[in-house]
Amino acid sequence: MTLNRIMELAKCSAYLQINDHRVVYADAVDHLAQFDDDELAPDIRAEMIRRDTVIEVWVYPRTPIGAYHVLHYDLDAALRRMVEILEAEVTPDGIRSAPARGGTDA
């Protein structure tokens, strides 16, 4: 259901990466080094490292310019957070606003 909702809300593009760091024989610490400490809650970062699990959800809601990016160790939590972000963009009259910010959601 959550993936379907993302598909409804993402008019441009969406993609999901699960443990992509393992393809290049890296660990979660190496992968997460590219993100600033303020881009990810410390407890989530720590759990991602402990589990060596990196879930990334990227959504370009309207155009190829301006994306939302959610990082987590739990797939369902990452998908729910992305739905929350996207649903917050929809105004009462149903008109979608432009993304408020890009980058990694913390």
Image (cartoon, rainbow, N blue to C red):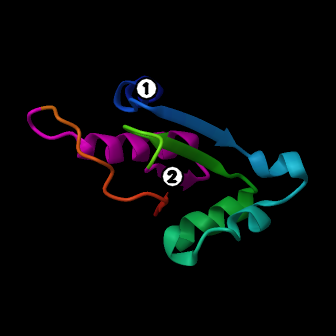
| Total number of numbered discs in the rendering | 2
Q: Residue at x 60, y 47 (%)?
A: 56
Q: Amino acid at mark 2?
A: Val
Quadrant where the N terminus lies?
top left
User: Hey, which quadrant is residue 28 in on the image?
Assistant: bottom right
Residue 35's spot in the image, x, y percent? 61, 68
Residue 43's spot in the image, x, y percent? 55, 69
Foreground pick, 99 / 25:
99
Foreground pick, 24 / 48:
24
- The answer to whether 74 is drawn above or below residue 102 in the figure is above
Is residue 98 shown left or right of residue 91? Answer: right
Q: Amino acid at mark 1?
A: Met
Q: Secondary structure at mark 1?
A: helix
Q: Which contiguous range is marked in magenta?
A: 66-93
Question: Within 10 angstroms of label 1, few (less than 14), some, or many (20 or more) residues?
Answer: some
> Where does label 1 land, which residue?
7
Is residue 28 shown left or right of residue 26? Answer: left
CA separation in Å, label 1 and label 2:
16 Å
Query: Is 77 one of the magenta-colored residues?
Result: yes
The residue lying furthest to the left in this view is 93
Residue 76's spot in the image, x, y percent? 51, 39
Compare marks 1 and 2 and give the one earlier in the sequence. 1
> Residue 94: which disc?
none
The residue lying furthest to the bottom in this view is 37
Residue 34's spot in the image, x, y percent? 68, 68
> Where does label 2 land, which residue?
70
User: Hey, which quadrant is residue 92 in on the image?
Assistant: top left
